Image (cartoon, grey):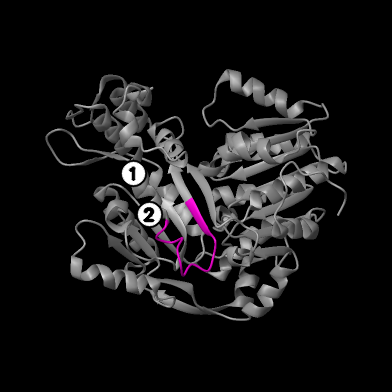
Amino acid sequence: MRPYEYETQPYDHQRKALEASWSAEFYALLMEMGTGKTKVAIDTMGMLYEAGKIKAALIIAPKGVYDNWAKSEIPIHLPKRIPRQILRWVPTKTQKYETELKEFIVDRDEKLKFFVMNVEAFSTPRGVDAAEAFLHQNPNNIVIVDESTTIKNRKAARTKNILGLQKRSKYRRILTGSPITKSPMDLFSQCNFLEEKALGFNSYYAFQARYANVMKRTMGHRSFQQITGYRRLDELSEKLDRFSNRVLKEDCLDLPPKVYMRREVSFTPEQERLYRQMQKLALAKLESGELATTASVLTQIMRLQQICCGHLQPDDGEIQEIKNNRMSELMDVVEEIQGKAIIWASYTHDIKAIAAALSDRFGPETVATYYGETPQDERQGIVNSFQMKENPLRFFVGQPKTGGYGITLTEANTVIYYSNSYDLEIRLQSEDRAHRIGQQNKVTYVDLVTPGTIDEKILLALRSKIDVASQVLGEDARDWLT
């Protein structure tokens, strides 16, 4: 590996991944969430730039992740000696942004250019055109697809459009902790982006015929091919090993015991409207015409958090849903992780909704809820089932003030906070359900956060070991609402 001075020192497993992959034309970084695959990709780009191999990078990531690349990951991990330009994709078309985008694409200076786009942009002609123009004008490039399971569906328009970028790219990487979410067939499109015959096939049907058992089925007047099982998976794994690096948390001896991550969730227009009303006026008017009002700063903060989560209860009436992106972001996170997970949510409404969504996606046997309404005589059985490695119960969905004390959930090494309690003790106790005696692995904590909202303030306070409830009752209470 060429000499390279890091901005932040890599862990041993990251250094090994770099040594194996940095100069490869295409490569899959199959690194479990929390093991630092983003840093490996950024150091790869830095090395390639200093070797004179690339001058531009197109980074494609899900909505909840792509801002992190532009705002934190690149600034933190790319050496300051490397001059850079970073442009983040903006879905809304404005004359100002279109001018900035055009100048960025054709700019010929010697800086390393990063164009960071959300994967959803590739469902639109405007997004596809911008990406293609960027790669055409900057042929010495690398294209990175972060959380590459977003292109596992070969029939989706965005998958087809991203696969079409291959011919305009010089280097390619996919990043994911879980390349197979439902079926080994998920690998085809992801690897096809890297190289048309990376797995030995440029036809999906030839790939399927080699590695799947298929049976012809008839339903009414329609016949179709149904996959009934899989075969030759050892051979498939050997092929994948030729151009990939698999890293699990359990193999990373030098990782810190706790790894913290955040996933950003954007507001819908309705959430934005209600949030700003509640923030400024201490009330919000729902589409039904009903009002939700507040009598104290703490209640106002609670209402703001509920809006971030996608629901609100008017003063007189039932809880009402607000169209939101939080549940879909949670599902994206869940698809990326290995093994069992704890999901904490402060509100009963959310716990029920999360359980229903997970049950629909993964099956009812994979989910259990643990909150105030959970019968006392069922609680220990839920914990026992979760703690059994072979038990299908995979997701423990709980309320931290109920499940955050006194129980052991060490079969999970991922903990997701759908929303946070204001109480520092509850946060610390809920973290320690997984991180305690009996835990054999590192634990990754993922917070869902809507930027620029009360979500961010609560999380910052908790990470700084500040109890939110006590602070907002003090003299600086109103600062929390700005």
Tell me whether the residue at label 2 lies in contact with that at label 1, contact meaning CB atoms closer than 8 angstroms: yes
Vertical order, 385 against 171 (above or below): below
Q: Can residue 343 be spotted in the picture?
A: yes
Image quadrant where residue 62 sits: top right
Q: Determine crowd level at label 1: few under 14, some 14-19, many 20+ residues with C-alpha closer than 10 A.
A: many
Quadrant in the picture for residue 154: bottom right
Q: Which residues are magenta?
A: 432-445
Q: Nearer the viewer, residue 27 or 338?
A: 338
Q: Whole-percent x and y of residue 90?
A: 56, 30
Q: Label 1 sits on what residue type? A: Ser
Tell me where residue 455 sits by quadrant: top left
Residue at image coords 80%, 33%: 81
Residue nearer the viewer, 403 or 278: 403
Q: Quadrant of the C terminus?
A: top left
Q: x, y (%) of residue 459?
A: 43, 39
Q: Is residue 441 magenta?
A: yes
State the predominant SS element of the stretch in magenta: loop
The residue that disc 1 covers is: 421
Q: Position of residue 394 (x, y in %)?
A: 40, 67
Residue on which the image places disc 2: 430
Q: Is residue 151 magenta?
A: no
In the image, residue 70 above or below residue 101: below
Q: Is residue 158 left or right of residue 386?
A: right
Q: Earlier in the sequence, mark 2 or mark 1?
A: 1
Q: Secondary structure at mark 1?
A: loop
